Image (tube, rainbow, N blue to C red):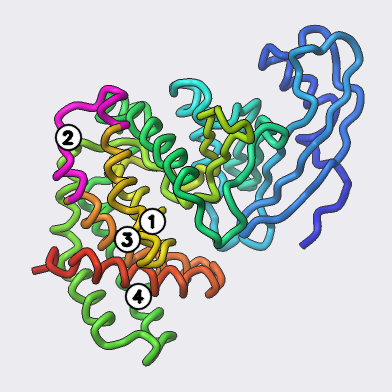
Amino acid sequence: MTISNALPPAASADHLTEVLREAGVLGTASVRDVVVKSARDTIVSHLIQLGVAYDGAAEEAPQSLILKLAHADYAAKLWNAGRQEVAFYTTVAPLMPPSLTPRCYEGRFDNDTRAWHLLLEDLTETHQIATAWPLPPTSAQSRSIVAALARMHAAWWDHPRLGSSVGTWLENAAMNGILQQFAEHFARFADLCGDRLPDARRRLYERFIEAASGLTQRYHSRRNVTIVHGDAHVWNFLLPKAEASDDVRVFDFDQWRINVGSSDLAYMMALHWYPDRRAIAERPLLDLYHETLLSHGVRGYDRGALDDDYRRSVLWHITTPVWQWSVGIPPVIWWNNLERIFMAVDDLGCRELLD
């Protein structure tokens, strides 16, 4: 789907004037003109780069913005899409250390229509995605990304706001409901795959479903947990173009939640990297992650505990391809994720966790 140059209401000059004044970057000036500089679709959203011109002094006002909108083709399938990300940028990000995420000037979600949008800082001139999907990043880029993820996790590590004013704890009944829903999705998924899902993998899923309620005890301990990104592949990180800078920004927060931090690491590496890449990078990056946590104030979480959590998280991510299939994510994504996560399960001995 191609986005036209017609401006949506959230990008009107009058609306942007109001938003930027409220953000404290416009003063008495006003937005004179707004143009679409570029536009593209992702799987679940529309992204529009807006060029902004002003009447009056506007030295602190942005010359461009990113407007993120719902993708109409996925609005019905992902009925709650956008709600989580708007909540993150409006309630969670303002409480975090600066320069971990792009600045959000406005986030709105309409409960009646489910329409939503975000007006975000445009970092196009200073930042870039590490690589074109699905090419993995270099070792240096991977280190920058993992260090940024650790800084974000450290900011919320066992934070007293977790589950009260930031995020929600899933109680046993809600968790069991999710697991039951997964079991139903898996039955249909297995039928679709047929003999493309080998018996050994099918049995592992069945054993996982039987044991899943016990595997949730790590989560229910409510210790050594944080806010996780939930979709922490490397293409959701913006790296600075300046080589000497460590100003990495994390974006795309529609899946954020309270969880064990290793869930993001397993998603990034075990789900998306092939064994040869993981053999080179996995252990050093886990070391770096742990070192960065400690340097940013995390205490009482030793390196062995991270290894244990990582293996559990890898096992949990066998569910991810099934969830992706269930909401219409294309096979080029979920099939490759399925293959890679089972390679990681075998490499790390994760089947033992079900014994």
Between the residue at mark 4 and the residue at mark 2, the CA separation in whole angstroms equals 34 Å
Earlier sequence position, callout 3 versus callout 1: 1
Q: Are marks 3 and 2 in contact (CB under 8 Å)?
A: no
The quadrant holding residue 275 is: bottom left
Earlier sequence position, callout 3 versus callout 4: 4
Q: Which residue is mark 1?
A: 269
Looking at the rendered image, the disc whose residue lies closer to the viewer, 1 or 4, is: 1
Q: Position of residue 261 (x, y in %)?
A: 30, 42
Residue at point 34%, 46% (across, down)? 285
Say the numbered circle drawn on residue 186.
Answer: 4
**Magenta residue span:** 292-307
Q: Are marks 4 and 2 in contact (CB under 8 Å)?
A: no
Please tell me whether residue 126 belongs to the stretch shown in magenta.
no
Looking at the rendered image, the disc whose residue lies closer to the viewer, 4 or 2, is: 2
Looking at the rendered image, the disc whose residue lies closer to the viewer, 3 or 2, is: 3
The quadrant holding residue 177 is: bottom left
In the image, 344: left or right of 331?
left
In the image, 55: left or right of 198?
right
Q: Which residue is mark 3?
A: 279
> Callout 1: 10 Å neighbours few (<14), some, many (20+)?
many
The answer to whether residue 354 is above or below residue 41 is: below
Earlier sequence position, callout 1 versus callout 4: 4
